[in-house]
Amino acid sequence: MKQETRKDEIIRTAAKLFKEKGYSAVTMRDLATEMGMKAASLYNHINSKQEILKEIIISLAEEFTSGLQEIQKSNKSNIDKLKDVIELHVNITSKNTYGMASLNNNWMHLKEKLEYYLQLRSNYEDEFRNVLQQGVKNNEIINGNIEVMLFSILSTLRSLYLWIPKKEDLNPEELSQKLSEVLINGINKKID
Amino acid sequence: MKQETRKDEIIRTAAKLFKEKGYSAVTMRDLATEMGMKAASLYNHINSKQEILKEIIISLAEEFTSGLQEIQKSNKSNIDKLKDVIELHVNITSKNTYGMASLNNNWMHLKEKLEYYLQLRSNYEDEFRNVLQQGVKNNEIINGNIEVMLFSILSTLRSLYLWIPKKEDLNPEELSQKLSEVLINGINKKID
DNA sequence: GTCTATACGTAGATAGAC
DNA sequence: GTCTATCTACGTATAGAC
C-alpha cells in the first residue's frame, strides 16, 4: 500500500463530488473548498479538471479489464466464472464507490481518452457475453435470450455503487454470495 | 393524443441532450441550436432551464407512482404483480428513454421539486419492497435477502433506458416477458 | 415568436508574490 | 505549496426591436 499523495487526495475528493453532482456541475472552486485550499493551488498537483476525470475513470476501467482477463484464464465452469465476475464487481466497487459513479455517468466528458474508454467497455461486454454463451453451449445456462441476461446482470453490477454505501451491514463476501444466488437462480420459489 | 406544443418539443429535445451530456453540461445555446433558434427565443416558451428539468422528471416520477398504485390494487399473486411492475417500467421507458436518463441521473439538480421527487422515489421503493415481502410471506418468492432482490431487480429496470434504444428488435411485450423470465427464474439451467 | 444586444455572474486556468 | 489577482470565455436570463 503506497501512501496517498496530495494528488491522490484531490482525485479521491473530486470523485466524491462528481458522484454527488456530476462532473460538469463541480467547479474547481468547489473542489478546492472541499480540499481546504484555493482553486489556483490545485494546479500545483494536477494539470486540469479533465486530467482528474481521466485518472478516475481509466484506472477503474483497466482494473475491470485485467480482472476479467484473469477470470477468463481459469478452467472453471462458466457459472463459476460468472460468480467470479460478480465478485470482481463487488470488490472493485466496494473499494471506490465514488469513482464508480464517474465511470458510469461521466465517461462522456472524457476528451482524449474517450475512444480508449469506449474500446475497453466494448471489449468488456464482449468478454462477458462470451461467458454466457459458453455457459449455454455447455448446458450450464438456460437457452434464453443472451442479450436480456447480459443486460440484466450487467445493469445490476453497474449499479452497485449506488447501493453498497447504503447497505454497509453486508460485507463484500456476503454480498457477492447473495447476489450470485439471486442473479443466477432468480427469486422464484420452486415447488418442493 | 394531444398535439405537441412548441414547449413540449423543447422539453423533448432538452431530454435528448440531457441524456447525452447531463443537465449541467447542456447550455441553453446548445438547446436553441438543436431547436433551430436562438437561446433568447426559448424563453418565450419556458421560464428557465430548471423548469425544463422539472417537467421531464416529475411527470415521469408521477407516472411510475400512479402505475404502481394501480398494480397494487389488483388481487393478483405477488409474482404476477411483479410481472406487471416490470411491464410498467418497460412501457414507460420505451416511450421516453431520453427522459428516463434525467430521472435517473439528473434529479439532484432539481431545486424546488427536489424534496417532492425524493418522496415519490422513496415511496415507490417501499411499495416495491412490499410486493417482494408479501411474495415471501405467501410462499411465492424464496426466503432470501429482500434488499438484494429489490436492488437487483430495480437496478435492472432503472437501466432499461440505456438498453432499449440499442435493442429495437425486441418490442415492449416480448421484452417484458423475457425480462420477467430472467429476473424471476434466473439463468440457471435446472437439471431435468 | 424570433431576433440582436447585452447584463451579470462564474467557469477553467495562469502569473507571479511569498 | 499556497496565496491574490486576473484573464478570457461562456453560462442563464432579460429588454426591446421587428
Image (cartoon, coloured by chain):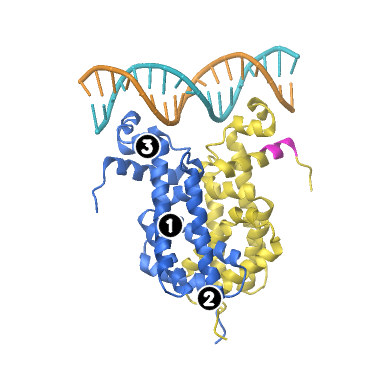
Chain colours: A yellow, B blue, C cyan, D orange
* Left/right of residue C4 with respect to residue B27 in the rendered view: left
Q: Residue at x 62, y 47 (%)?
A: A99
Q: Which mark is residue A136?
A: 2
Span highlighted in magenta in the image:
A5-10
Between circles 1 and 3, the one closer to the viewer is 1
Residue A26: quarter of image: top right
- On the question of residue B165 being in view, the answer is no
Which chain is indicated by disc 1? B
Residue A78: quarter of image: bottom right
Front residue of B82/D10: it is B82
Distance (Cα) linking label 2 and label 1: 38 Å
* Left/right of residue B87 with respect to residue C15 in the rendered view: left
Which chain is indicated by disc 2? A
Which chain is indicated by disc 3? B
Q: Main secondary structure of the magenta part?
A: helix
Residue type at the position of mark 2: Val
Front residue of B166/A30: it is A30
Distance (Cα) linking label 3 and label 2: 46 Å
